[in-house]
Amino acid sequence: MNIRNLFFLFIITVMMASCNNDTTGSEDTAPPAPTKTVPVPRFDRDSAFVYVEKQLSFGPRALGTEGHQACKEWLVNSLTGFGATVIEQDFTAEVYTGASYPATNIIGQYNPDSKNRVVLAAHWDTRHIADSDLSTERRDEPIPGADDGASGVAVLLEIARQLGQNPLDLGVDIIFFDAEDYGHDTKDDEQITQAEQEARANTWALGAQYWANNLHRPKKDFDYGILLDMVGAEGARFPKEGWSMYYAKAIVNKVWSLADKMGYGNYFVNQQDQGGVTDDHYFVNKIAGIKMIDIIHKPQKSETGFGPHWHTHNDDIDIIDSRTLRAVGQLVLAVVYRENNGQM
């Protein structure tokens, strides 16, 4: 997760005025009626917390590290064990420093024959440096990434476990994007040109960019997607993110409405964020044209735009609250199973 949102503020403010007619992308062809109604399973917050701990046990998962390779193998084995058909989408991440690293998007498919699909995504790599303005030491060392990386992956792993135990008809693709967090710092955006700003933005979310240009199945199969980024901190606040509202307003509103009905309105606040975060979902929307929203922690008051642990070595297990994991996970499970049951 990067320092990636402020330079789009003016652009997105102008474009927002034209987005009132947004649809979910599935209205052109109505999905078939479900052959079975499946109750929404219970999201196990303790299980998700253990998945965060397991990722941290590998150490930082920055590109080119032993922890990155070990975590990759564990994620593939975990999804396979939970009944998914797994695709390892390998690519070369050419990062802003000029270096190149092997990288892999890990895709777990449920009901691969289904032509109506929902994508659930998170990034599994971690930042290679602690470059937050709030970092005071070890700035050139990779961060643990408990919230920024591991939390979203942990929630999706528990969802994958539930999908394996509670089969449905809807197609679900769980994607762990790689090489999201090795981008060029954008703190000095005001001192560079628009072209330079956009070039720096494109150094982030390399895995999402690769997937958007190399979809593992036809675009028409994907109804919409949900991205999870930093979804584990105590007292997390999830406003309606700017690019999500621009590209997929109807999806944002129905997910946030369901969150309120489920009693999670204290997390999913009915307020639009004043900017767009150049996260994985941005490139999925822009390049692939697949509507994807972002559930991301944005405190109301913040020196960096994100939580104080962001891109620091404080982003460790002490930041994670299992109640936050459950709020996000139970909501996303409800979205998926209600879609399957024709209730969304």
Image: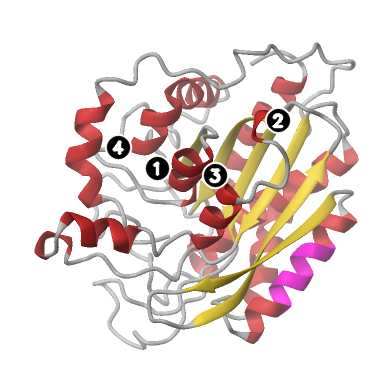
Location of residue 101 with respect to 232 vertically, above or below:
below
Q: Is residue 269 visible?
A: no
Residues at circles 2 and 4 in contact by the CB criterion of under 8 Å: no
Query: Mark 1 vs mark 4: which is more N-terminal?
Result: 1
Instruction: Give me the disc on residue 28.
Output: none
Instruction: Give me the disc on residue 237.
Output: 1
Residues at circles 3 and 2 in contact by the CB criterion of under 8 Å: no
State yes or no: residue 229 in magenta.
no
Relative side of 163 to 185, left or right = right
Indicate which label's residue lies in the foreground, 3 or 1: 3
Amino acid at the residue labelled 4: Asp
Specify the segment rendered in magenta.
70-77
Q: Main secondary structure of the magenta part?
A: helix
Image x and y of residue 100, in percent = 52, 80
Image x and y of residue 85, in percent = 86, 50
Location of residue 201 with respect to 256 vertically, above or below:
below
Name the image quarter holding the N terminus: bottom left
Residue beneath label 3, please? 227
What separation in Å lies between label 2 and label 1 (alpha carbons)? 32 Å
Q: Residue placed at 47% from the left, 83% from the top?
A: 99
Instruction: Give me the disc on residue 221.
Output: 2
